[in-house]
Image (cartoon, rainbow, N blue to C red):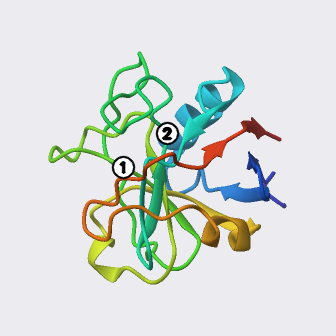
Amino acid sequence: MNAVTTTLTLKLKKGDVIIELLPQLAPNHVKRIEQLANEGFYNNCPFHRVIDGFMAQTGDGKNHNGTGGSDYDDLEQEFSKEPHVRGTVSMARAQNVDSANSQFFICFGDTPHLDGQYTVFGKVTDGMQHVDLLKKGHPHSGVVVEPDIIVSASVS
């Protein structure tokens, strides 16, 4: 029996990024991402924090600067043994491991120090070259001036 694969498509100005969602690893996080994408929460959302060689963070559809989330409750962590490698999509959070809400990041390369610390919910299967082209932020903080945006996000 083949499991149905759900994908999240991020339309960027330079091209589409296709993310395979992994509900077997993080069912509640995948459900939240699908819900927010279907509600248009991620449309026009900036990649507000991008650190070259590390990751690109987005998902603050409220404040657009990394300080906001959705109106839904935060999620309990769903850590797994899935490694953070190039193309891994994982939820951002605050100090509290159960504080993920709407923000997520895409890894530019292998980042083993994140393994078991953040909830992996997807992997880029196509369009990683477009993620590589995102405008980079400050080398330490990652804060991006006039960041690239997600034009629209959809689930199929």
The local secondary structure at tag 1 comes to loop
Looking at the picture, tell me which residue is in the foreground, 100 or 12.
12
In this picture, residue 6 sits left or right of residue 70: right
Q: How many other residues sit within 10 Å of disc 2, few (<14), some (14-19) or many (≥20)?
A: many
Residue for badge 2: 59
The local secondary structure at tag 2 comes to loop
Do the CB atoms of the residues marked 1 and 2 lie less than 8 Å apart? yes
Residue at 39 percent across and 28 percent down: it is 69
Give the residue type at disc 1. Answer: Ala
Closer to the chain start, of discs 1 and 2, is: 2
Task: Give coordinates of residue 2: x percent, y percent.
Answer: 84, 61
Camera-side mark, 1 or 2: 2
In this picture, residue 80 sits left or right of residue 149: left
Alpha carbon distance from label 1 to label 2 = 9 Å
Looking at the picture, tell me which residue is in the foreground, 80 or 109.
109
Looking at the picture, tell me which residue is in the foreground, 155 or 24.
155
Residue for badge 1: 92
The relative height of residue 79 versus residue 101 in the rendered view (above or below) is below
Task: Give coordinates of residue 16: x percent, y percent.
Answer: 80, 55
Residue at 44 percent across and 67 percent down: it is 55
Residue furthest toward the top?
71
In this picture, residue 137 sits left or right of residue 113: right
Q: How many other residues sit within 10 Å of disc 1, few (<14), some (14-19) or many (≥20)?
A: many
Residue at 51 percent across and 45 percent down: it is 146
